[in-house]
Image (cartoon, rainbow, N blue to C red):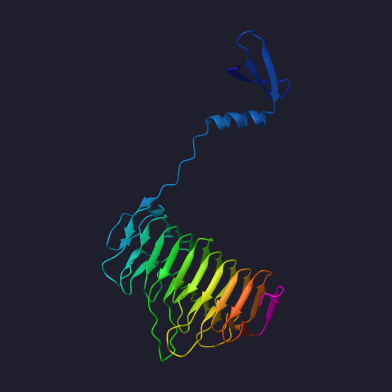
Amino acid sequence: MNKTYNIIWNAARGMYIVTSELARSGSRAIVSVSASCAVTLLAMDAAPAVAEETRVSIPSQTTTYTLSGATPFVVETGNTVATDIATSAAIVGDNSNDWDLLIESGAVVGSSLTDSQAMNLDSLTGATSVHNQGTITGSNEDGTILLQNGGSVINDGRIENSATYEHDPQDIPQEYAGVYMLNGGSYVSSESGVLEGVSGVIVQSGEAHITNGGMINSDGSWRSYGVEFRDGTYGTIVNTGTIITTASDGSGKIEDAAIYVHTLNDMAVSGSVSVDNSGLMQSDFITVALYHGSHFEVVNRVGGVITAGNSSLVGIKSTAMELKVGVDNL
């Protein structure tokens, strides 16, 4: 078997010559290759192995963990990060950095204590990222995960807000969401991702992009929503999974929606929102409620289902709107 290889530069040919020494015959088999290929071979031989990503491990603890430094963080399988103080967040990060957190499968962040919060994260440039493969839980009015200045949440596990809604006679909107974004952001769910709360995702303002391939389940309260865009929030909502709400708070009023886009003061704003559905969107009231924006587009693709209980499938109040449907799927 050939064991020895020589690479020789041939100036006349303007290329490298790769020669293999045949041990018994002493003859030499010559193969010509371009200089670039030979250099590539040499580089591959000399290149170091790619190092695995380094993350700071957050240990199990019952006090708030404060993020610091630019290195990404991880809550490893089997670890639980929670607090004994109900109103404190388990993990916090200020605006000195953009935070990068990975919650591994089998890890838990947050607790079932009343008004508890799992994460309260600010961001330097809006690039904070949370990738959940485990369980993130809480019951805080400001969301189980609060992103103060944008960022992204990727959910391959379970995120829940276990608060119980109590009907407010003043009709004050609720914010007991699984994910609450104050200034734009994105939420992406895989097929295995589950998000539950009085509302699923609430975005207060800015640009937002929601992509759901799993389950967003609004737990069934008056004025609870799967996805809620407020005060001029604009962007896209793409659903290939399930977004469902079921009002059951006993107030005698039903005003929930799978998708709700509006302003709190009912003033018209300039913002374009696109809803693209090829999964299931279901509500007891209006499934898709789009109010007070300059342009809305609803696309229900073949195979997509939009279903409502005792009101409208789609309610729209806008200066411009488009409704595109497939066949027999509304």
Image position of 241 (left or right of 70): right
Residue 6 x %, y %: 61, 19
Residue 88 x %, y %: 30, 69
Where, quadrant-wise, is the C terminus in this rendering?
Answer: bottom right
Image position of 166 (left or right of 61): right
Residue at left offset 66%, top offset 76%: 297
Instruction: State the extent of the magenta-drawn residues as a range.
Output: 319-330
Q: Is residue 204 above or below residue 109?
A: below
**Residue 52 in sight here:** yes
Residue at left offset 48%, top offset 82%: 247
Q: Is residue 163 above or below residue 72?
A: below
Where, quadrant-wise, is the N terminus in this rendering?
Answer: top right
Residue 120 x %, y %: 38, 67
Residue at left offset 46%, top offset 41%: 51
Check residue 271 for magenta coloring.
no
Check residue 321 for magenta coloring.
yes
Disc tally is 0
Q: Quadrant of residue 107?
A: bottom left
Q: Is residue 5 above or below residue 271?
A: above
Q: Quadrant of residue 293?
A: bottom right
Q: Is residue 164 above or below residue 22?
A: below
**Residue 206 in sight here:** no
Image position of 267 (left or right of 116): right
Residue 79 x %, y %: 33, 55
* Foreground pick, 122 / 154: 154
Image position of 74 (left or right of 7): left
